[in-house]
Image: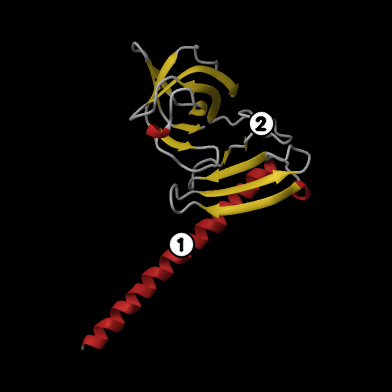
Amino acid sequence: MKNKYSWMLLGLAVIVGGFFIGKHYYTKAYAEREIDAFIQEQSVPNKAIYDEKFVWDWMKSGDYVKNFKVRGDSADIVYQYIFIGKGQDVLFMPYSFTSDEPDVKYPLAKTEDDFNLYLGEAYEDGGSSLYVQHLKLFTGMEPSLDDGKYVLHKTSDIFDADGKRIEADDIKKGDALKIYLSENTAVKETSLRRLMGNIFLRL
């Protein structure tokens, strides 16, 4: 009887494990297709791509990330694409270890309607909220926010320069930030203006 239950438990473990492994490979394939479609719309030629890597950041974010370099761009510029989940946009977040604002040869074909990209900096260490100032509209259609101080709430994703997800309290005063604000972000007037909505940050 004991052996019977042992075999049943083993069989159940194999079934459950097989389900999650199958789900992972399905999601991985779906993510790569979505990223590749995004890259195709961006008109990056396949022959110009090198040092390509596609990884699953299973230890931290759980996101799928594709990185590569492009011939014709500076060798320190990395094109980075992040797939967060079905129904969400692929994020194009190029970075460089020598520049806060890498000038890529193949920028987005058009500005995404859903997000506006701002450049700014932290004026206090991060905590449960983020404190930013000197916001400047980099890409997008919305008018630029006034150059004041803002508190960011409901921040959904924060990434460092390597594309790894970090926490708000890892951000320190003076850190340069790239801030993606969704079109439904609301500004609540207080002594320090508060931004509510979907916010993606990248150091």
Looking at the image, is 187 positioned above or below residue 39? Answer: above
Residue 103 pos. (x, y %): 69, 30
The residue that appears at 69% across and 44% down in the rendered structure is 69
Residue 201 pos. (x, y %): 48, 32
The residue that appears at 45% across and 26% down in the rendered structure is 184
- Which is more toward the observer, 113 or 13? 13
The residue that appears at 73% across and 48% down in the rendered structure is 49
- Which is more toward the observer, 172 or 8? 172
Residue 27 pos. (x, y %): 50, 57
Label 2 SS:
loop
Label 1 SS:
helix
Q: Is residue 64 visible?
A: yes
For label 2, the crowd category at 10 Å Cα-Cα, with few meaning under 14, some 14 to 19 and many 20 or more, is: some
For label 1, the crowd category at 10 Å Cα-Cα, with few meaning under 14, some 14 to 19 and many 20 or more, is: few
Left or right, 174 with reference to 11: right
Residue 179 pos. (x, y %): 51, 28
User: On residue 102, which mark appears?
Assistant: 2
Residue where numbered disc 1 is placed: 23
Looking at the image, is 187 positioned above or below residue 33? Answer: above
User: On residue 156, which mark appears?
Assistant: none
